[in-house]
Amino acid sequence: MIEKKYTGNYQVAIFATLLNNMNNKFESTYFKYYEDQPKGPQDRCHERGDELAHEFFVAIDGPSRNEYASYKDSSVFLEAYAGVSNDERCFFEQIREGRACNEYYDID
């Protein structure tokens, strides 16, 4: 499900097209912030992703605020990510409480 409320801003329109294409091809979910929604986009994304049995969730550095998406698993996300131009790659994996996840190490 893609929520469609975008401004006339060109960058936002490109971003919206990218996410619509990702949704159609990869069966992902995408949610952004709207003041009139009773729940935030992260909560809505998690709920819809859970309904679809998605295992991989990301935050996206959107044009004005973080936006959220979910994918069946990390391999589906990586396939979608490969089609995103370098200047649009601003995704951050969400590690959800109580869920299995990979170990990550930040070694400097």
Image (tube, grey):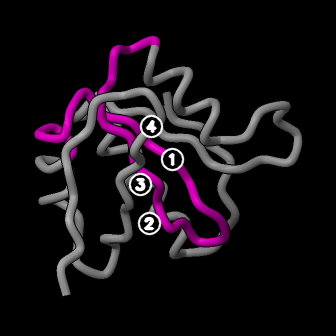
Labelled pair 3, 4 in contact (Cβ < 8 Å): no
Residue under pointer 4: 96
What's the residue type where badge 1 is placed? Tyr
Q: Label 4 vs label 2: CA separation?
A: 29 Å
Residue 26 drawn at (x, y percent)? 23, 34
SS category of the residue bearing label 2: helix
Residue 74 highlighted magenta (yes or no): yes
What's the residue type where badge 2 is placed? Ile
Q: Label 3 vs label 4: CA separation?
A: 27 Å
Is 11 situated left or right of 81 in this image? right
Residue under pointer 1: 68
* Between marks 2 and 1 in the image, the one whose residue lies nearer the viewer: 1
Q: Quadrant of residue 36?
A: top right
Say which mark, if any, is on residue 30: none
Q: Which residues are magenta?
A: 51-77
Say which mark, if any, is on residue 17: 3
Q: Label 1 vs label 3: CA separation?
A: 15 Å
What's the residue type where badge 3 is placed? Thr
Image: 78 above or below 106: above
Q: Which residue occupies 44% across, 42% down?
A: 69
Q: Label 1 vs label 4: CA separation?
A: 13 Å
* Between marks 1 and 3 in the image, the one whose residue lies nearer the viewer: 1
SS category of the residue bearing label 3: helix
* Between marks 1 and 4 in the image, the one whose residue lies nearer the viewer: 4
Q: Label 2 vs label 1: CA separation?
A: 17 Å
Residue under pointer 2: 14
Q: Earlier in the sequence, mark 2 or mark 1?
A: 2
